Amino acid sequence: MTKRPGEQYRIDPHPREKRWISRKLESHAINRRDDDDLETIYFVRYATRRLVRLLLRNNVPAHEGNTWTSFEDISESDFTDDETPNWKNVLRRFTVNAKYDANRTHYQNGSIGFRFVGEFCRFCEAHDIDIIKLKAEDIDLVRERVEECLYDWPNNFHRDQLTANFEFKLAQSCEDRRSLDKTALATTIDPLHVPIKGLNPNYTAWSVVEDVSVNGNGMVPGRYLIPTFNQSKRPMRDYHWFGAEVISPPMSLHDKEAFEAIRKACTAIRGSLRCHKPMESSTGLHVHLGHKHGWNLLQIKRFVTLWALAEPILIHLHRKDRGSARMAKWCGKISEGTCLGQALSHRDPNIRYRQSGCLPRSTPAERDRSKASMAEHFDISTVEKSIREFISNVWHYTSISDLTDALAGGEDDENDYIRPAIRIRIRGDKKSDEPNENNPATIEVRTMHGTLDADHILQWVIVLEKLLALSRNAPNALINGTVKLMMGALNRTNDKVHQLLLGLQLPPRTVHYFMSEVNRTGNAALGEDWWVYPDRDVVDWLDPFMAPGHKSTHGQKYDIV
């Protein structure tokens, strides 16, 4: 929470909310505008580790990156069940026993002390207490408790032999436990991850990083319903919000356990943390599509063509802001926001000239072959001229690398880099090169808004899986027939979204999910319908957090069945 000037103790803005809120951080002078500020670094480090631990405790294999600055007390947290136990009360229930024998050697007494450490560790485990929470002064208390249990030993020297070895061994065990914990945070591997050559080690398990673009800047007071008795002037400033990017490892589209892992991760985060309901401002979900056998140039051309044709309608599966001018920088249309798109049709002739270097440089014979190849797969004669010209040029490229460069982000009005809705991260000639950290041989889809609704995420993945299957495996006749059905939707004046989903021959459940009246708004007859949340993008400040679970973020009554 954010402590206001003059406040000694910050009152919880939502006292009835039982999910976690950090009291440790409220005293920190966090300057979110200064990324080099130590308090800010501590805040980011603390929040990131908290999320990783949360995933781990819910059996979601997660680990941290290895680029963090170390803080002495970062392993401490103020989750209720992670608070340091009251060791004086705990130790009243712990007892050990050993008969006194004056003939024992120092080694034998020390061995008994070591055995007592094992008994203490088992005692802690039975009471759900982790010895990682033991500090030096706590170890002294445990030693004193052992001394109390040996009150009937007449020789203090022998008792000291035992307790000194007990203290040494317990301190060593605690340190070993911390080392194991630190190793686990850095080296956990998710058995569901797909082992890919060149995969960044950070992506072998779930991970969490800060996303500075998730800042809530667009969430002004007018975006909230604030009751008169709760005089919050800027809700986004009542807390130190942490904009997190939760990253899954690469998983198989055909693995049911992978789908369940996404549900489990969403449930873990929403069930324990105060997650702001989906914001219309600046949050996005990115899906990376790849294959263990890599890509060839034809497959990429097919995918890009399908996307260019369907994108004007596909974006309506998501929130209205994803198609706004403001979001063009973050998920721009590939026919407009890429270097190729700008070279062909940007309104500014200077930008068209600057981007013209990316245009395909194929010979007349190569162009004839590419036209014939495209005609075997797609009939785009009825497509809007600008889209038709864009797709035709896509098919003229003779190498993957040249096509990838042409589909990189162009420049916006402020000469800043645009992130297209799909980002081709593949290099090669006719066949993709081996993946590496910079070019993982994937197509990144950035269209969907951010959410922790696992059902919504997985239904979107099903749509992308269909496009992927058509691009990679479909015979020419099938892809041509599918495109004709899609074109029927594109050429309609109403009900475009529904018809496109039917044209893609998606499962009925997926069609029903996206077309449910619960989450659609706007005039479908005019092609102006979008995904919308039940609050219609005005968040009730009395209930601003996502509901627990993995389904609808606004509660069970809005689940789509």
Image: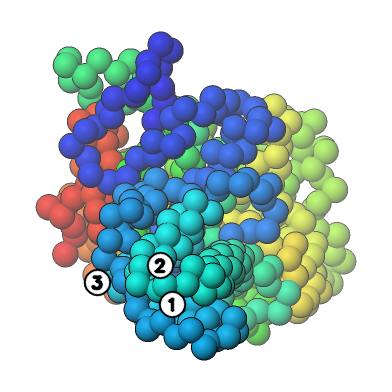
Point out residue 472 in the picture as x, y percentages from the top left corner: 57, 79
Residue under the point 77% across and 34% down: 351
The total of numbered circles placed on residues is: 3
- In this view, the residue in front, 75 or 134, is 134
Please state the horizontal and vertical placement of residue 95, each as a whole percent of the image.
31, 71
Question: Is any part of residue 400 visible from this angle?
Answer: no
Vertical placement of residue 176 versus 17, above or below: below
- Front disc: 3 or 1: 1
**Quadrant in which the C terminus is drawn:** bottom left
Q: Amino acid at mark 2?
A: Val
> Which of the two labelled residues, at mark 2 and mark 3, occupies the earlier sequence position?
2
Q: Give the residue at mark 1.
A: 116
At x 43% / y 56%, what residue is drawn? 141
Q: Could you tell me which secondary element the residue under label 3 belongs to?
A: helix
Spot occupied by residue 210 in the image (x, y as percentages of width and height):
56, 45
Disc on res. 328: none
Disc nearer the start of the sequence (3/1): 1
Query: Mark 3 is on which residue type?
Result: Pro
Q: Element type at marker 1? A: helix
Residue 301 horizontal side relative to residue 239, left or right:
right
Question: Which of label 2 and label 3 is nearer to you?
Answer: 2
Horizontal relation, residue 103 to residue 357: left or right: left
Q: Which residue is mark 3?
A: 508
User: Which percent across, then down, holds residue 552?
Assistant: 24, 54
* Foreground: disc 1 or disc 2: 2
* Quadrant assignment for the N terminus: top left
Graded by Cα atoms within 10 Å as few (under 14), some (14 to 19) or many (20 or more), the crowding at tag 2 reads many
Residue nearest the observer in this picture, 464 or 122: 122
Vertical comparison of 43 with 61: above or below: above
Where does label 2 land, which residue?
146
Q: Residue at x 58, y 39 (%)?
A: 42
